[in-house]
Image (tube, helix red, strand yellow):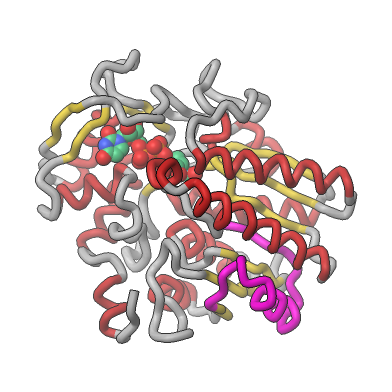
């Protein structure tokens, strides 16, 4: 809805920055905050490079704060300085393997931070929130494609448990206070980049996700791709996922905010996926043909905590949000490749050029 002001937590990150493009282009005013735990800072308290470039893409201004959601006073200042109409909460850390090594870091940064945000929102009578959730809350699917009614909670990693716990918090507080109006978006596997090639997933931060890693192999920074498991019960033995273009994901957030403005739903969950299951080898072959590059690979043991296959039934978002993923897998690969080849060091170079430290 044009003219409304949305607070975007984690706005400097991969999903947050791409979503901010769509929010600005839909007429929202954006106030963004980030603590740079998983994104690249700008010079001093200045605008981070990802959001500088979002301003370049859209020709619109962003108000930015360096703010950690664990700093409640800092967060309160933002709500005192701006009339916030709604919030999209991206800020979280999301490396599955890291979450098993440092559970307290994940519970603090994902859970405590969310509690602070919700408390400050309530203090300022802001009750519309879109929450960045994840298909990891489903655990190992009992049936596919997976719908929002599939049981949740049988999660084998701390990262996924933090998302599931937060969904439970939203449920409890929306029952206790009927003013709350939540939508939780369960992402499948976000990949790709804005077609301009100006913003994307910074490789220094996405050190485990497959597409940034594959691109690093393609540009010669890594010797080969390790494929985790070749003996799964899938078409070619490799893991299957529902890869969704980050711009489709971003459009889903605008649709969700518009829905909250139109209808008071208390709490609704929507899958944001394409409905297509793609194996690691299928992704690799598509990436090679689109980028005309060779990706040497070795098939090794399965990665602990990995599920075999996960892809969405996204018809609820289509029917209720009027949203449907449109970008194809080749477009996801081509757009990521443009970002990678134009920015081989991600945002690192421009951050150093601006003299920022990280
Ligand atoms: C994808 C596939 C791997 C790397 C991620 C995020 C999580 C959530 C969902 C948002 C799997 C295989 C990977 C590699 C490989 N997103 N792979 N070699 O594990 O599905 O989860 O998306 O909430 O935050 O972590 O994504 O990209 O790590 O793996 O073979 O070097 O690629 O086994 O089948 P995953 P991923």
4 on left or right of 58: right
Task: Classify the position of the N terminus by image quarter.
Answer: bottom right
- Please give the name of the residue rendered at 51% of the width and 66% of the height, measured from the top-left corner: 21
58 on left or right of 87: left
> Number of numbered discs present?
0
Give how far across and how far down residue 63 sits, in percent: 58, 80
Q: 355 or 74, which is in the foreground?
A: 74
| Depicted 337 relative to depicted 9: above or below | above
Give how far across and how far down residue 340 sits, in percent: 24, 59
Give how far across and how far down residue 243 sits, in percent: 41, 38
Give how far across and how far down residue 68 sits, in percent: 56, 70
170 on left or right of 94: right
- Please give the name of the residue rendered at 86% of the width and 43% of the height, measured from the top-left corner: 175
Tell me which segment is drawn in magenta: 66-90
Q: 303 or 85, which is in the foreground?
A: 303
Magenta-colored stretch includes residue 59? no
Task: Classify the position of the C terminus by image quarter.
Answer: bottom left
- Please give the name of the residue rendered at 50% of the width and 43% of the height, measured from the top-left corner: 159
Image quarter where ligand 1 lies: top left
| Depicted 230 relative to depicted 294: above or below | above
| Depicted 167 relative to depicted 147: above or below | below
- Please give the name of the residue rendered at 43% of the width and 33% of the height, measured from the top-left corner: 242
305 on left or right of 151: left
Image quarter of residue 221: bottom left
Q: 213 or 67, which is in the foreground?
A: 67
Magenta-colored stretch includes residue 71? yes
Image quarter of residue 279: top left
> Quick check: can you spot residue 324?
no
């Amino acid at each position: 809805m044009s003219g409304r002001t949305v607070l975007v937590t984690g706005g400097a990150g991969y999903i947050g920055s791409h979503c901010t493009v769509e929010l600005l282009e839909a007429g929202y005013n954006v106030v963004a905050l980030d603590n740079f735990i998983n994104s690249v800072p700008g010079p001093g308290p200045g605008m981070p490079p990802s959001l500088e470039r979002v301003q370049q893409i859209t020709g619109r201004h962003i108000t930015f704060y360096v703010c950690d959601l664990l700093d409640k006073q800092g967060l309160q200042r933002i709500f005192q300085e701006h009339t916030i109409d709604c919030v999209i909460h991206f800020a979280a850390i999301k490396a599955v393997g890291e979450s098993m090594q440092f559970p307290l870091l994940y519970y603090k940064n994902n859970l405590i931070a969310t509690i602070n945000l919700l408390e400050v929102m309530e203090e300022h009578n802001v009750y519309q929130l879109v929450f960045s959730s994840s298909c990891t809350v489903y655990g190992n699917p009992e049936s596919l494609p997976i719908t929002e009614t599939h049981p949740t909670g049988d999660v084998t990693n701390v990262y996924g448990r933090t998302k599931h716990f937060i969904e439970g918090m939203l449920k409890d507080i929306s029952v206790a206070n009927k003013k709350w109006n939540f939508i939780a978006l369960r992402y499948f596997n976000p990949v790709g980049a804005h077609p301009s090639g100006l913003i994307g997933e910074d490789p220094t931060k996405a050190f485990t996700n497959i597409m940034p890693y594959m691109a690093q192999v393609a540009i010669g920074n890594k010797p080969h791709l390790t494929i985790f498991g070749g003996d799964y019960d899938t078409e070619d033995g490799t893991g299957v996922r529902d890869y969704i273009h980050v711009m489709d994901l971003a459009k889903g957030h605008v649709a969700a905010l518009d829905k909250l403005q139109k209808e008071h739903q208390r709490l609704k969950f929507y899958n944001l996926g394409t409905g297509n299951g793609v194996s690691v080898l299928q992704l690799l072959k598509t990436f090679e043909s689109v980028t005309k590059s060779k990706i040497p690979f070795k098939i090794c043991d399965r990665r602990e905590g990995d599920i075999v296959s996960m892809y969405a039934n996204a018809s609820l978002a289509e029917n209720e949000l009027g949203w449907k993923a449109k970008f194809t897998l080749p477009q996801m690969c081509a757009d990521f490749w443009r970002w990678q080849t134009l920015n081989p060091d991600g945002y690192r170079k421009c951050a150093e050029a601006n003299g920022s430290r990280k």
